[in-house]
């Protein structure tokens, strides 16, 4: 991290000074100044993150007590996409002397699954964007550096989501009132499992409709303290399922158990 800051002091500040000097000469280019400052700051952040990750990896390489029974195999270069932009860094492949398992201990240290290409913050930003925009738009706008991913990658991330069932507390909570609201929405599918699997009915229309069911359980409505007049649900929990009518019973069983 310190090397990145040192480099920014030597090179980055000069670049910022040039950006502001250009703005003094052309004050109408305010937006360009903002974009230039953002690019410089993002580049600094990415460089600091890369250096920090490599320092963790170097610590594991240099300190055998931090990795008992693991020995070094080789060092690889990898790329990871974040919501700031791509980071490129080196990480070491280790092998366990007894089990012969091979892994990058840095990934374990970071709690990251093997072959991860998108960080949690990047995935969260993608899902946030896709709520309001298309797959393609989400892949373009999620990253501050302007780097993009394909709409197919966004689609796979969305379709591979899994939602755990609500935890049932050991001790039941007592509420004066309990409200259950149920609703549904109709979804037009591009396909069900893979492209081209939508059949047409006798009228030539694609069978591309699905129904999303939503049930939310709450204790009433209260005023949000931060904003004074805004209303919000009290202690809400949400249950959702996409499917046909045969899954209604399973959805209500889940709500009932909760």
Image (cartoon, helix red, strand yellow):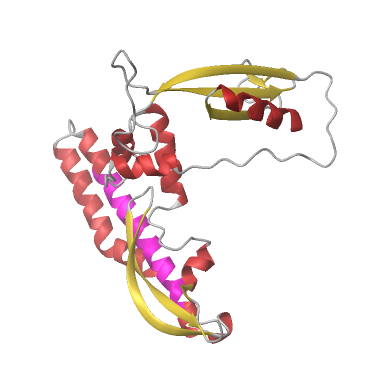
Quarter of the image with the N terminus in it? bottom left
> Could you say where residue 79 lies in the image, as x and y percent from the top left?
33, 61
Vertical position of residue 77 compared to residue 124: above or below: below
**155 with respect to 20 (left or right):** right
In front: 163, or 191?
Answer: 191
In which quadrant will I find the C terminus?
top right
In reply to whether residue 240 is colored magenta, the answer given is no
Nearest the camera: 133 or 59? Answer: 133
Left or right: where does residue 190 sit relative to residue 28?
Answer: right
Q: Nearer the viewer, residue 249 or 19?
A: 249
Residue drawn at the location 29% of the way across and 34% of the way down: 196
Res 8 → quadrant: bottom left
Q: Position of residue 136 (x, y in %)?
A: 28, 35
Locate residue 48 relative to residue 149 in the image: left or right: right
Magenta segment range?
Answer: 36-58
Dominant SS of magenta comes to helix
Is 41 one of the magenta-colored residues?
yes
Vertical position of residue 73 compared to residue 130: above or below:
below
User: Can you see residue 1?
Assistant: no
């Amino acid at each position: 991290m310190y090397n990145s800051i040192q480099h920014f002091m030597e090179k980055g500040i000069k670049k910022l000074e040039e950006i502001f000097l250009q703005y003094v000469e052309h004050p109408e280019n305010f937006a360009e100044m903002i974009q230039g400052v953002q690019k410089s700051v993002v580049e600094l952040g990415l460089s600091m993150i890369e250096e920090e990750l490599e320092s963790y990896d170097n610590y594991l390489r240099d300190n055998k007590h931090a990795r008992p029974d693991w020995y070094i195999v080789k060092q690889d270069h990898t790329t990871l996409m974040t919501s700031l932009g791509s980071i490129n860094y080196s990480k070491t492949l280790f092998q366990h002397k007894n089990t012969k398992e091979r892994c990058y201990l840095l990934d374990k240290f970071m709690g990251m699954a093997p072959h991860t290409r998108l960080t949690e913050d990047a995935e969260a930003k993608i899902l946030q964007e896709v709520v309001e925009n298309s797959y393609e738009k989400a892949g373009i706008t999620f990253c501050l550096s302007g780097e993009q991913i394909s709409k197919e990658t966004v689609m796979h991330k969305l379709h591979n989501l899994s939602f755990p069932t609500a935890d049932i507390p050991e001790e039941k909570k007592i509420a004066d009132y309990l409200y259950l609201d149920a609703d549904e929405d109709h979804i037009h599918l591009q396909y069900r499992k893979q492209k081209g699997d939508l059949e047409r009915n006798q009228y030539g229309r694609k069978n591309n409709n699905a129904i999303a069911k939503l049930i939310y359980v709450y204790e009433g409505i209260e005023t949000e303290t931060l904003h004074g007049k805004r209303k919000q649900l009290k202690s809400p929990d949400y249950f959702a399922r996409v499917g046909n009518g045969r899954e209604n019973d399973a959805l209500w069983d889940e709500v009932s158990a909760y």
